[in-house]
Amino acid sequence: MIFYDTPMALNRERHRRLKLDKQAGDYSYARQTNSVLLAATEMIEAAKDYPLVFVGKPGGDFTVAGLVGLRDRENLFLDDSGQWATGRYLPAFVRRYPFVLAEEDGNPNLTVCIDEKFSGFGEEKGELLFDPEGNETELLKSQVAFLQLFHAEMQRTRAFAARLAELDLLVARTIRVEHDGRQEVLDSLFVIDEQKLRDLDDAQALGLYRDGYMPWIYAHLQSLGNIERLALIQAQSQPQSSASPGMR
């Protein structure tokens, strides 16, 4: 629930007159995070720009995240005005804000929530979420449909990651980046072990192929080269120095 200061269940009465005035291209709410969750179906596009890693813990659930920074509370893809870097893939996790689906213990249904503190919500400017009769407007319907699609894709992502964990393909990795004598450390990350991948038997490898997982696996492996690029972006955002960043 990062980004969300005051998540509140959407209510036809409480929010009857609420309007959304979302400023196009302003993603300031995503400034203080160095990673965002990704659906597996985003991995091929996201791999062009970000290092993609698996997050979770052995014996538990894993999912996929894209790194957008190397330090805590740092997003290297936002400029001072909150604009996302031109030409870079914008994750669905970011695009869904200020809406989100919430799960409640013991309740199989998902609840649509909004961040009431979002500056784009008000009663003066923007588009209504509900019409005068209390029905969902086309704006809200499209937002809910997007949330439901993203939720379904994240379920597929967890199944994908669970299969990799079952095959013992995920290994812990610590990323260390050095620049000007300073070292940034990211741990509790997991990547696919290429040797273990090659050692799978034919039936296991065929199962990954038939489930459609192989393109996502290769996207992840290819994306790891972006760690060095992320270090360079970080270095360029700091005062110039003769030292160059190094990664290991």
Image: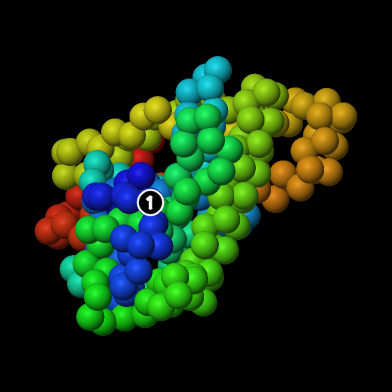
> Residue 233 in the image: x percent, y percent?
30, 58
Q: Residue furthest top?
A: 59
Badge 1 density bin: few <14, some 14–19, many ≥20, Cα 10 Å = some
Query: Image check: 9 left or right of 106?
Result: left
Residue 219 appears in view = no
> Residue 244 in the image: x percent, y percent?
25, 50
> Which picture quadrant has residue 71?
top left
Establish if 160 lies above or below 216. Answer: above
> Which picture quadrant has residue 11?
bottom left
Q: Residue at x 35, y 40 (%)?
A: 247
Say which quadrant the C terminus sits in.
top left
Query: What residue is disc 1 on?
Result: 9
Amino acid type at mark 1: Ala
SS for callout 1: strand
> Residue 239 in the image: x percent, y percent?
12, 58
Q: Residue at x 82, y 35 (%)?
A: 207
Q: Residue furthest left?
A: 239
Residue 122 appears in view = yes
Q: Residue at x 25, y 37 (%)?
A: 184
Residue in front for this viewpoint, 75 or 10: 10
Query: Image check: 206 left or right of 42?
Result: right
Q: Residue furthest front?
A: 133
Q: Residue at x 62, y 26 (%)?
A: 165
Say which quadrant the N terminus sits in.
top left
